[in-house]
Image (cartoon, grey):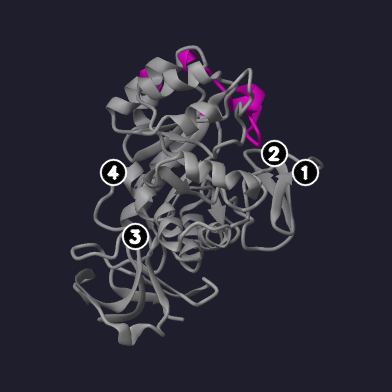
Amino acid sequence: MIVRGRLVLDDAIVPGRLHIEDGVIAAVDTDVAEIGGPLVTPGFVDVHVHGWGGHDAMGTRADLDGMARALLRRGVTSFLPTAVTAGLGTLRDFADRVRAWMPEAPVDGAEPLGFSLEGPFISPDRKGAQNPDFIVTPASVDRVELAPLLAGLRTTTIAPELDGALDLIAWLAESDVAVALGHSVATVEQGRAGYSAGARSTTHVFNAMTGVDHRTPGLAVAALTEDDAYVELVADGHHVHPALWPIIVRTKPADRLVLVSDAMYLAGTGDGDGSLGGLAVEVRGDRATLAGTQTLAGSVTALDLEVRNLFLAGLPLPAAVAAATRNPLALIGVTDRGRLAVGQRADLVELDNDLRVVRVARDGAWRIPG
């Protein structure tokens, strides 16, 4: 297969062709004759997504199928089904279900690379839309209870100020889990201690955490000033005001910004009412909130729109694409995809001039043909 167009490479956009053999990029040729073609990017990767298209990541195997297929239509070729805060038994059931489903996940959907947990080791004072009934402290849980969660666990959220949090972060880091700090009232010093203990990322920076105050700096300051720490950004214009996006992109090294959707299962279905972790939620327009409040309950925005938003805000397109492709993959240690380069898996997205998804390929085959 040959894919023609304007290729979004690591640091430039060049007209050319991709030669695909056995689902892998075999050659990358530049050719000015392809200047009028579509934009071609690596497939997007969502490492924090709770559902899509009416399908809940914590639902049945059929829900996981539907979620994967719905995400692929938005250019997401790889993802981590993400659980909200729940009881440990429920989370173990979720992990078992995802692990059993992964080998049979549909080829016409986004590929699962494991799973993620948002909680339950979070602060009740920054719980956001997480159910407080299931929040626990790390010191209160035996490692034996957590061991069944480790296989396939790629990322998890922990508030570093909790009793026993630093020990838990170190234990998970030794198991190659990318711990993200978040849902936290940590001081800047407690945040830095969390990163020093082994945390690698930050759950939706600025949201549900202590922020930037000139006398009492919090976790957001630690996240932005620790160069090695990744930060998740939900670039929907609601989670973080666009006026703050330049502060994030100017503070963080370019390879440490990770776009995530944090989408809940009603995303892509229009206005409606539902529940998240046992809490009532409502979707109105492009916002999801706890019913009757202004508290955001995840998002209803996909990564393709977030890439467009960052680009329109002034970030060069290669950098915006990297935040939705190779950066999240680097966070979880996946190296066989995420770049338009020889030897990389041919997970591809074609975009029109308005950065809207036209076609999507996975493993070198057009699964969403346009």
Pointers 1 and 4 in contact (CB under 8 A)? no
Report the span colored magenta: 120-145
Spatial separation of the CA atoms under disc 3 and disc 4 = 21 Å
Q: Where in the figure is residue 101, as x and y percent of width and height? A: 37, 52
Residue 291 — which label?
1
Is 141 one of the magenta-colored residues?
yes
Q: Which mark is residue 279?
A: 2
Indicate the secondary structure of the residue bearing disc 2: strand
Mark nearest the camera among 1 and 4 is: 4
State the mark number for residue 333. Answer: 4
The answer to whether 337 appears left or right of 79 in the picture is left
**What is the CA distance from the residue labelled 3 to the residue labelled 1?**
43 Å
Q: Nearer the viewer, mark 3 or mark 1?
A: 3
Q: Nearer the viewer, mark 3 or mark 4?
A: 3
Q: Amino acid at mark 4?
A: Gly
The reply to whether callout 2 and callout 1 are in contact (CB within 8 Å) is yes
Which residue appears at 24% of the width and 56% of the height?
A: 336
Viewer-closest of 97 and 346: 346
Q: Earlier in the sequence, mark 1 or mark 4?
A: 1
Nearer-N-terminus badge (3/1): 3
Earlier residue among tags 3 and 4: 3
Q: Which mark is residue 11?
A: 3
Does the magenta run of residues contain 193? no
Name which of mark 2 and mark 3 comes first in the sequence: 3
Residue displayed at 69% across by 43% down: 296
Image quarter of residue 76: bottom left
Name the element at disc 3.
Answer: loop
Q: Is residue 364 above or below residue 215?
A: below
Specify few, some or many for label 1: CA neighbours under 10 Å numbering under 14, 14-19, or 20 or more.
some
Identify the amino acid type marked 2.
Answer: Leu
Query: Mark 4 Cα within 10 Å, few/some/many (few <14, many 20+)?
Result: some
Q: Nearer the viewer, residue 21 or 138?
A: 21
